[in-house]
Image: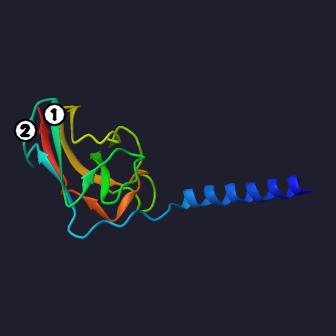
Amino acid sequence: MKRTLLAVVLTGLCTVAVAADEVGLPGSAAPDGASVYIISPADGATVGRQVSVRFGLRGMGVAPAGVNRPRTGHHHLLIDVKQLPPAGAPIPNDSRHLHFGGGQTETSLTLKPGTHTLQLELADAHHVPFVPALVSKRITVHVE
């Protein structure tokens, strides 16, 4: 009887945890005055197919994903994304939402010729955006 009851309770807890994850938990609070920005390339720059992107951050530190330290987060680079990922849910990990969970502050991309937008979004240890969202200005680059 005790084992059955324990199994029922554990199943219920797992169901609640999965349901909370599916609706998205609120993100960590963003510190006042914190901001994220793209150091380079400059907005409107014409670049080659290999593009170096340097990330900037003020008022916080960078820590790898999974490391839960106060006032830290890690970068996500959004490529040609028109709408920010939903608040309270982990940022997707795909070809348009690049994760830098190792704490990287720069990257080299290969982009197709044409016009592209780049934007940074900082996330907490669990890839969830801060509240309010810490996002850079969206910049445009022209790839030759």
Q: Can you identify the residue that label 1 sits on? A: 51
Q: Residue at x 69, y 59 (%)?
A: 13
Q: Position of residue 132 (x, y in %)?
A: 32, 68
* Frontmost residue, 116 versus 2: 2
Which numbered marker is on residue 46?
A: 2
Which numbered marker is on residue 86?
A: none
Q: How is the image coloured?
A: rainbow
Q: Which of the 4 quarters of the picture holds residue 142?
A: top left
Tell me the CA gap for discs 1 and 2: 10 Å
Q: Residue furthest right?
A: 1
* Frontmost residue, 8 versus 121: 8
Q: Position of residue 123 (x, y in %)?
A: 35, 54
Evaluate if marks 1 and 2 touch, with contact meaning CB atoms under 8 Å apart: no
Q: In this rendering, is residue 130 above or below 51?
A: below
Which amino acid type corresponds to the residue marked 2 in the rendered image? Thr
Q: In this rendering, is residue 19 above or below 50?
A: below
SS label for mark 1:
strand
Mark 1 surroundings: few (<14), some (14-19) or many (≥20) residues within 10 A: some
Q: Residue at x 88, y 57 (%)?
A: 2
Q: In this rendering, is residue 110 above or below 59?
A: above
Q: Nearer the viewer, mark 1 or mark 2?
A: 1
Left or right, 58 with respect to 6, comes to left
Q: Position of residue 76 (x, y in %)?
A: 31, 47
How many numbered marks have been drawn onto this rendered protein structure? Answer: 2
Instruction: Tell me which label, 1 or 2, sits earlier in the chain.
Output: 2
SS label for mark 2:
strand
Q: Which of the 4 quarters of the picture holds residue 95?
A: top left
Q: Residue furthest bottom?
A: 32
Which amino acid type corresponds to the residue marked 1 in the rendered image? Val
Q: Residue at x 33, y 57 (%)?
A: 84
Q: Position of residue 141 (x, y in %)?
A: 13, 43
Left or right, 84 with respect to 107, comes to right
